[in-house]
Amino acid sequence: MSPYLTAPNPDQPVGDLADLERKLKALAQQHVRIFVMTDWWRPGNEPMRESFVRTCQLAQAAGATINVTLWHGWGNDPAGASKAMAHLLQDLVVNRAVSAARYVTLQNEVNSTRITMQQYDAFYRMFDRDLRAVALRDRIQIVGGDLLRKNEGAWFQNLATELAGVCDGYSVHMYWEYPQAADYLRRRMSEVAAIQEGLPTQARRPLYITEFGIRGKDWHTRGNEPGFFDDGTPIAHSGVYALQIGWLMTEATRRGFVATVQWEAYDVGYPRIQMHYGVLGEARAGWPLRPSYQVLRLFTHTIAPGWRALTLDGDSGDVALAAVEGPKGGLTV
C-alpha cells in the first residue's frame, strides 16, 4: 500500500477514502507492506507522516497485518536512523494504536544498492537493540532481505551467518514480463527454495515474497509501468495479469512461502513516478476494481492466516496446484 495516500503527487486527487476502505475490507487483505522514511517524523514533514499513518490505519481497518519497511536513507547516520525507526514505531503502535504493525524490514532491495553486508548487519543489530529499548521487540518481528535475484545466494548466506539471531524471517522480490511466466515462476521459486534448503537448519526462517508483479510491453518507458498487453490494453487491466498473480500465489503456497505481497493495492504514485500495478485503479476513476482484485479476493476468502500448505505428490508443466488445511480440518485446493 502506497504511503502517499493523502499526500499524492500534485496531479492526483486524494479520492474517496471511505469508498477505498469499503473495497479493501471486501478484499479482506491479510498482510501488507508500507514504506516509511524516518524524515517523516521531523518537523515540517507532517503531511507525509499523517499520510503514512492514515495508510496504516486503513490497512488495520481492512484486517491486515503490516510490514513497516524503512525504505532507504539511513546510510549517513545508521545509529540515528535506527533510534528514529524504533521511536516512530513506538508512536505508531502505542500512541496511535496501530497494533497491526507487527513486522519490520530495514532497506528496500539492499542487493541493488552499494550498501555492504557489514553495514547492513550492523544496522540490523542496532535496530534490534533499539526496538528492545522501546519494549516492542516481543510485538514486532524483523524480516531481513527484500532481495532481488542479483547475488541473492551470497546475501542469504550472510543473513543465515550474521543475522539469524536477529531476523524472524527472510524476504525476496519477484518481477517478470508476462510471456516469461511459465519458465520464470518455477525456476525462481526453485532457486529460492534451494537456497533455503542449503542453509543450516537452525538458520532457516519463514520466507516472504514482499513484492511481486507482472510487466508488459514498453514497461521501461517512463510513465508506462507496468506496460501493455499485446493488443495495447494496460497489462494490469487484463485477465492475463490476474491469471499470473494467481499462478504466483499458488506456486508460492505450494513451495512453503508464508506470505505474498502484490505490488500493489491501488494506483497512487510515488514521488516523480507514476505506476499502475494496482488491483484497484486510481482515485480519480473511483478506485475501479480490476480482474486481479477478484483473483486476490478468491485467495483471501478461502485461505486464512495460520493455515498450512500440504505436501502434494507429482508435478505438471501446465497445472499449478496447492492444497491448504485449516486448524479445524478445513481444506482449500
Image: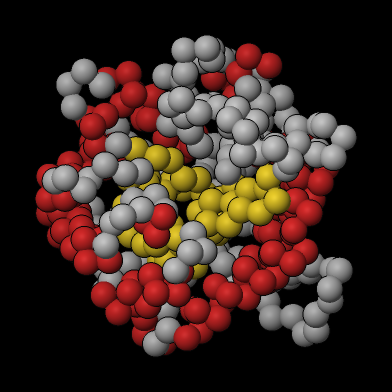
Can residue 83 be seen here? The reply is no
Quadrant in which residue 256 is drawn: bottom right
Apparent side of residue 53 relative to residue 211 in the rendered image (left or right): left
Q: Position of residue 266 (x, y in %)?
A: 59, 31
Q: In percent of the image, x 17 and y 21: which residue is there?
A: 43
Q: In percent of the image, x 52 and y 12: which residue is there?
A: 11
Relative height, residue 289 to residue 296 (above, below): above
| Quadrant of image for the C terminus | bottom right
Relative height, residue 193 to residue 27 (above, below): below
Q: Position of residue 1 (x, y in %)?
A: 51, 37
Q: How is the image coloured?
A: secondary structure
Q: Position of residue 294 (x, y in %)?
A: 76, 41
Q: Position of residue 242 (x, y in %)?
A: 76, 45
Quadrant in which residue 28 is drawn: top right
Front residue of this view, candidates 7 and 25: 7
Can residue 110 be seen here? The reply is yes
Apparent side of residue 82 relative to residue 220 in the rendered image (left or right): left
Q: In percent of the image, x 36 and y 30: which residue is there?
A: 53
Relative height, residue 78 to residue 286 (above, below): below
